[in-house]
Amino acid sequence: MINRVYVIGDISLGGNVIGTVTYNLDSVEVDSLDVINRKEVGKWLESHSWEFETIIDFKVEIGTFFSDWERVGSEREWEECEFHDEW
């Protein structure tokens, strides 16, 4: 079963440096969520995404729950960061 959260965020103190992380959640992390929804995953990210100064957007695939990127262009930005050598 896929339990992933894809994140785009600002990784610099000065801003304008975008980074990405894919979190692969184990069963303990999934069980720590009160309810599996976008709001709860956002709360989880606040305490687990130390790489980012701010989170710009995220996509969730946990079990049968799916929540796509909220911001137009986020998927493209994520792909450009993840696969920048292939562009």
Image (cartoon, rainbow, N blue to C red):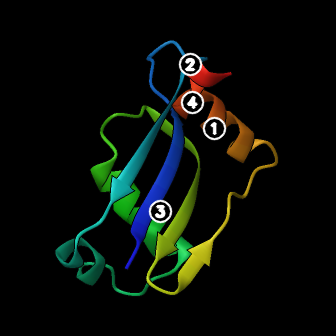
Determine the residue positioned at 34% across, 34% down.
51
The alpha-carbon separation of the residues under discs 1 and 4 comes to 6 Å
The three-letter code of the residue at mark 1 reads: Glu
Q: List the residue tagged with mark 4.
A: 83
The three-letter code of the residue at mark 3 reads: Gly
Q: Which of 77 and 86 is in front in this view?
A: 86
The alpha-carbon separation of the residues under discs 3 and 1 comes to 21 Å
Residue 36 lies, with reference to residue 61, above or below; the image says below
Q: List the residue tagged with mark 1.
A: 79
Q: Using the rendered view, name the quadrant where residue 29 is placed.
A: bottom left
The three-letter code of the residue at mark 4 reads: Phe
Tell me if label 1 and label 2 are in contact, CB under 8 Å.
Answer: no
Estimate how packed mark 4 is, as few (under 14), some (14 to 19) or many (20 or more) residues with alpha carbons within 10 Å.
few
Determine the residue positioned at 71% across, 44% down.
74
> Can you name the residue that lies furthest to the top here?
14
Q: Earlier in the sequence, mark 2 or mark 3?
A: 3
The three-letter code of the residue at mark 2 reads: Asp
Nearer the camera: disc 1 or disc 2:
2
- Pinpoint residue 59: horizontal percent, then vertical percent: 58, 60
The alpha-carbon separation of the residues under discs 1 and 2 comes to 11 Å
Q: List the residue tagged with mark 2.
A: 85
Q: Which of marks 3 and 4 is nearer the N terminus?
A: 3
Badge 2 marks a residue whose secondary structure is helix
Q: Which of marks 1 and 2 is nearer the N terminus?
A: 1
Q: Is residue 60 left or right of residue 79?
A: left
The alpha-carbon separation of the residues under discs 2 and 3 comes to 29 Å
Q: List the residue tagged with mark 3.
A: 42
